[in-house]
Amino acid sequence: MEDQGQNDPLFPIAVLIDELKHDDVLLRLNAIHRLSTIALALGAERTRDELIPFLDESVEDEDEVLTALSEELGGFVEYVGGPEYGHVLLSPLENLAAIEEPLVREKAVESLNKICKELSQSQVEDHFIPLTVRLSKADWFTSKISATGLYNVPYSKATPPSQEGLRQQYGQLVHDETPMVRRQAANNLAKFVKEMSPQIVIEEMIPLFQHLAGDDQDSVRLLTVEILISIAEVIPKEQQTSHGTLLTALRSLFEDKSWRVRYMVADRFEKIAKAVDEETVTRDLVPAFVKLLKDTEAEVRTAIAGQIPGFCRLLDRETLLNEIMTSIEDLVSDTSQHVRAALGTQISGLAPILGKEETIAHLLPMFLQMLKDEFPDVRLHIISKLELVNKVIGIELLSQSLLPAIVQLAEDKQWRVRLAIIEYIPLLAGQLGQDFFDDKLSTLCMSWLGDTVFSIREAATKNLKKLTEVFGVGWASNAIIPKVIVMGKHPNYLYRMTTCFAISTLAPAIDLEVIEKSILPMMDKLVSDDIPNIRFNVAKSYTVLIDVLKHLPAHGTIFDLEKSGQTLQPSSAGQHLIQQQILPNLEKLQQDEDVDVRYFATTAAGSVGDAMATSP
Amino acid sequence: MSDLDKAISELRACKIIPEPQVREICHKARELLIEEANVVQVDAPVTICGDIHGQFHDLMELFRVGGDVPDTNYLFMGDFVDRGFYSLESFLLLLCLKVRYPDRITLIRGNHESRQITTVYGFYDECLRKYGSANVWRYCCEVFDYLALGALVLGTSSTLEPSFTDKSQAIEPVDDDVEIEIMNSRNEVTARFPRSRRRLFESDGLNSSPPGTPSKTGPSGTGATSDSGGSHHSGGAVLCVHGGLSPLIDSVDKIRLLDRKQEVPHEGAMCDLLWSDPDEIDSWGLSPRGAGFLFGPEIVKRFNHLNDLSLIARAHQLVMEGFKEMFDSSIVTVWSAPNYCYRCGNVAAILELGEDTSNGGVIARSNGDAGRSAQAFMPNLAPRSGPGRRYRVFEAAPQDPRGMPAKKPVADYFL
């Protein structure tokens, strides 16, 4: 502005002010973001008298700049001299709230409301409410849309006469001729209603709601679901029954001819149920729920499937079993895979509500069928939520009835399903016992080591570690280690690598003897593998083994130690093994022709050095 | 953890790294790439991948299926950027991995690794959006100019190692005669093709090195080598380029002579290598793409014969099954962007070439044998026996973890 070059300390500010007018959008944007710096330097008075009027005129800019400006002004009250001057900010924001670009308007409305919260009653009465009214009466719909968002905040601060004026003005917006305005009026009515007393809501807002609920545009009607919830939340439950209009509106929403409206109802079903009184729930909502479960549109059924546990929790068990359960059971064989997938995520949530016996009677058959669903997401959702069912009926029963299905899923075509099953195995193993496990699941676990998908092979090695923790080292050295050794002889390097991974993950769960007798001899062979990738993975495994050997006592495993919390003296045999069997190989690897092998071998050898330094 | 390792883990989480760091990494990458030949030599085993096109989450899926860097060796045949929403993250991750593990990953140039193309197809806009300036785009474009034009995979095995599909027994021996195996991520071998009549041609009087004599006698492709694949187990050399052949290029050596450090030209050999497509035509044809050429089976077979190649692997074209072998398996298209552009519904594939362990680690160099051009017009162009090829087919990553940059999906749905 005019003051540039006036004195040196203000020079940077002068530059910024220049940038506000710069041709480059990026620079203007940058200047807007630092508007507070400018204001701070100018002081409150000059900000009010010079900066704000300047900004007032700068609404002819790129939307990006205007969005930034709208946002900045929201936090500007402190720079214009505190709340008592807050109203000077309203003028530029009023202009911004009339802009065509919705993003700018949204930010302007947001900022206006933010400022309004800091204004006094008289400021609201004198400045803010007139602004709201001006925007509401504007010719162009963009201003009116902004106006709909500017009622609820000033309302709570206004005097009763002004409040009445605001309500009447809002009524005009609800009856506006353009659907764009009516949509926003419907959207904001839900918030506006919450500022009013039940009496006023019943007398004045329910008619507005009815008007919107009867709109010929379904895009308006679907928004009334939220208003209905708000109204029901404001009016005490015991008074609701006396207002038949609400219930009529509710019923007509359930049966709206537009599926988008029904979708909205279905999607908010739990919220509706919580807002209305119990009698309405059992008399109206339960049949409506069943009806939506059978809706002709898959989207509606998907939405309502998502509400199953939430809504059913509000009902008593008898109603659930007698009136709703059969319809839920029908969804298991729904024609839409998305409905089934949504059911899959939610259905386990019914287990705690139903209790053990009913879960066995009703849910288990559904699970079994859904586990065989041809759409992988359905299977995956069921498995990932089994935990809930497990808590209700116990793992024993679950595994007995589901084991065949689980074994089948362990070979599922989708690798993510297989992955989900792998994560379940240790839990199952602990419950089933070693014999049963060896009999039914052991081969499965080993076959995962050779899966075509890397992630499955990786998960399989982690699984083996957990199994070793469950069944003990003795079992591991008989059942696992031989299989792992076989993998090390595989002609494909990607599978030989599984051996290295398995050793690294198993290391904390095996004892000194197994390391000495089985692991290290195998590593000796892999050290001279043709493929560098194997050799540096050997080095990585050595790093883990060294760390384990440094702490390993003569008997037991690292895992045992951690579990018992004991600190036992590390066995000297460990150090011996490091020196005799590992270090020579690492020295060899450090001379390798491949740079990555040398790197990882050096890292591994370095970790030995740490051991020397720390051991007394 | 070094800065580079930190950058890699940031990028793996699909987060961008600071601009100065991008600059540094791009400089390091250039130092590294300038040392590479136009045709990089890659030793088997290696996993060959096609177009990625900024589909970061699908690239992660690729690593989940094929194994991680550095554990698995990878060769990416270009088109890392454009079209997808995460070109930056995808390319920078691959570049960081290249800088961190130069011997474990090879990147060659695709037609989208160019200033002109990236300005139109999304990478430029993405850089501008994510960094607020085009500097990062500029750094990346400088790296593009240094990317190799092709790669030559040596030391492949002609036989496939056993794969694991039988649940009861960990190792299932695969018939020695299996040449191609297709596996999906469902753990199924969907198809196996036996090695056919090729065997008959295999020892067609070519000079083979005496057993036990190492044949590392000269740089590959210079004619200084003598072993032309007489070994029973060698799968021969595989040439990898992004697009295909050029009428100006009749030997791999001609590629080596190009000056590659420039923006991809509108015509000429370098352009063709990145733009051409194979097609069922006689000899050469005009490409509908407006750059490069179409080339027919005879061109490929002659080129492979003259250069002693067993296979050309290329990317560049969407194939719904993830890969497509053409012209009696003399050329294959590999495509690694599942559900291309998030809407094509295709599956993706990567091609694994196994290591040839029969020679005790000595790699048979076998391409570009100079003396052979004299026999170029032999009536019978006997194709070399191809390497054992395992195609791993995979699908797009699940939708959930992929934060599509859509503002409010539900709201959009209703408007």
Image (spheres, grey):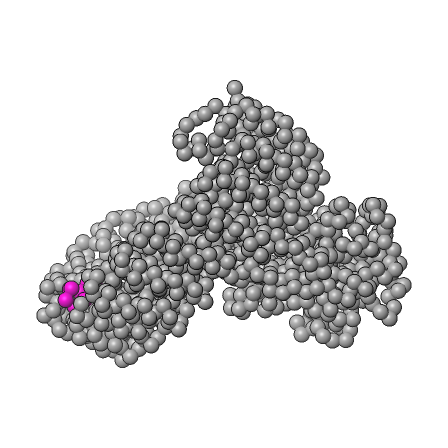
Is residue B34 or residue A213 the one in the foreground? Answer: A213
Is residue B9 or residue B22 the one in the foreground? Answer: B9
Which residue shows up at 82% across the image and 64% down it? Answer: B201
Total labels: the figure holds: 0
Which residue shows up at 43% across the image and 59% down it? Answer: A405
Q: Image quadrant of residue B329? A: bottom right
Q: Is residue A394 left or right of residue A454?
A: left
Which residue shows up at 73% across the image and 70% down it? Answer: B327
Is residue A66 or residue A174 the one in the foreground? Answer: A174
Q: Does the magenta stretch include residue B88?
A: no
Q: Give the range drawn in magenta.
A: A272-281
Residue that sits furthest to the top in the current view: A616
The picture places residue A317, in percent across and down from the top left corner, at: 21, 61
Which residue shows up at 29% across the image and 70% down it? Answer: A327
Is residue A464 or residue A264 the one in the foreground? Answer: A464
Q: Is residue A279 magenta?
A: yes
The picture places residue A185, in percent across and down from the top left corner, at: 25, 70
Q: Image quadrant of residue A154? A: bottom left
